[in-house]
Amino acid sequence: MASVPSLASTLQQRISDALSAALPEAGSADPLLRRSDRADFQANGMLALAKKLKGNPRELAAKVVEGLPAGDLIQEIEVSGPGFLNITLSDRAIVETLAARVADARLGVPVKEKPGTTVIDWAQPNVAKEMHVGHLRSAVIGDAVVKILEFAGEKVVSRHHIGDWGTQFGMLIQYLLEHPHELDHEGREAAGEEAMSNLNRLYKASRALFDADADFKERARRRVVALQAGDEETLALWQRFVDESKLYFYSVFDKLDMKIEDADVVGESGYNHMLAETCRLLEESGVAVRSEGALCVFFEDVKGPDGNPVPLIVQKSDGGFGYAATDLSAIRNRVQELGADTLVYVVDARQSLHFKMVFETARRAGWLNGEVKAVQLAFGTVLGKDGKPFKTREGETVRLEDLLDEAVERAAAVVREKAQDLSEEEIAERAAQVGIGAVKYADLSTSAIRDYKFDLDQMVSLNGDTSVYLQYAYARIQSILRKAGEVAPKAHPELALAPAERALALHLDEFAETLTGVAETYEPHKLAAYLYQLASAYTTFYDQCPVLKAESAELVENRLFLCDLTARTLRQGMALLGLRTPERL
Ligand code: ARG
């Protein structure tokens, strides 16, 4: 496992050194290296620098060129315009760097020198409720971020903060007590969807009774009190709801091709025993104050439409604890017990005010300090084709399972049309990989904070920025590598690179830096964009440069080598986004 410095970073370092030598007053100055159309790279940093120090940029640029060490990295460098540097790298350096990448299982991507511990809160549906597209987003983005951080070497602990506590359980449990066979499966394990439809039926029935029957309402209210007091029979029934719901959650996560560990599912109830203490600590330290009987935290900059401050309510006046008390307790647990130095919350942007207030409260209480940072990786709303929040024609929230099934169905049509030698079984397997990939990719390829339109036609399209396009690029490369048979990929640094080979190669070399950046900023969409550009650069290469029919044996091997590294890079990058790469499509 040897990390491979990119060509850009080596070049950057060399120019930066030459610049400091040419202009000691500038200290360590940034040459502002960029990829360019005219040459491989352009450096513009001399312009601003010379201006600042009242020098001549062209002269400075020329001095930098003189000061560069001789070697085989740079093939050509020229001063151009008012004082840019245009730099063309040597073909040898490019191919040698890529050869070092292909030889490394991590493709030369470095591991963090000082890994920390990140506790990430993602995929948090609610017990006894249907999952919706918002839960889909948290799951898809969270899964990708976990994989990206782990690959970077970070220690990652997942927390699925499911909604498994609250007053609605009084009603549900009371109903189940009075209708004891409603959740029975006659001895069978209920499948996920069946579990949900049982819960739905029960929810509706208990709700109807609750609204119609005042006595039941009162019994339900007393049941909440019993639940909170830890009454055994009540807790046992509550546990049945949780278990039944988990069957359903796991079936959806399974469909999503995601692994959720049971030990990481720590719902709201998991912090129940901490709530009273959290409130006591906040009140004693004066961070929270009593206001009209409720325990509240106030903020300078959080005001309602009437201009009055809107507090974070930690404990209601009737003594009940809410969402905020749970989240504050979870912070104490995650920092003090789990040792987190970073907390990430993959949660809908509509909860941003909540998290802003919770984080600020935790800071005032000293549970978050300079050593621990908390970020909400907030995501936008999923919209329908009409640009409005995604609903069925009847105005109901769309059932996640139906949506995923439809995506797989559409994908099956696409796969079948293209399939040449696939069996029905293979078509079904590919359809799942393509359909689920399409849904994930559509989510991951836009910046999380933006809303996006859920458009299955676009998602499974073969052309354009879709996972299917990436999967086909990968499968096509595998087919070439299979056809090459005995001829193995081999780097030939002595060969000259054609423009399309060069463009592909320089993009391949950016993989490590792209990943490192994505892990720092939690922006999987930048990895998606990188992979899409990679597949595009590959397509151009494939159109312009014959691989198996290239003029010489060396050229065939070298092109196979570019194919091979492209495939490995696609596979690694796509795996980090939770996307499968079937070998044949
Ligand atoms: N269960 C919540 C919902 O469905 C999301 C929980 C987010 N995480 C948290 N720590 N509050 O909206």
Image (spheres, grey):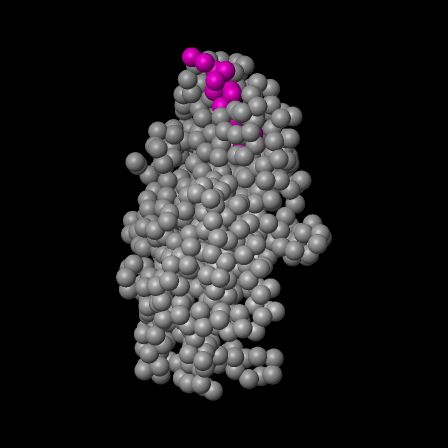
Task: Look at the image and give the residue range highlighted in magenta.
Answer: 469-486
171 up-or-down from 140: above or below: below
Q: Is residue 400 left or right of residue 31?
A: right
Percent across and percent down for residue 355 are: 46, 67
Q: Residue at x 32, y 77 (%)?
A: 281
Front one among 4 and 49: 4
Q: Quadrant of residue 466?
A: top right
Give yes or no for residue 331 being in the magenta stretch.
no
465 up-or-down from 132: above or below: above
- Whether residue 199 can be seen here: yes
Front one among 122 and 36: 122
Give yes or no for residue 479 being in the magenta stretch.
yes
Q: Residue at x 32, y 64 (%)?
A: 333
Front one among 361 and 69: 361
Q: Is residue 336 left or right of residue 240?
A: left
Percent across and percent down for residue 222 are: 45, 73
Q: Quadrant of residue 388?
A: bottom right
Percent across and percent down for residue 4 are: 35, 37
Task: Quadrant for the N terminus, please.
Answer: top left
Q: Residue at x 40, y 21 (%)?
A: 490
Q: Is residue 263 left or right of residue 535?
A: left
Task: Quadrant for the C terminus, please.
Answer: top right
Residue that lies at the very extreme toward the bottom in this rendered image: 292
The overriding secondary structure of the stretch rendered in magenta is helix
Q: Residue at x 41, y 23 (%)?
A: 491
Front one among 320 and 489: 320
Percent across and percent down for residue 505 are: 48, 32
Q: Quadrant of residue 375?
A: bottom left
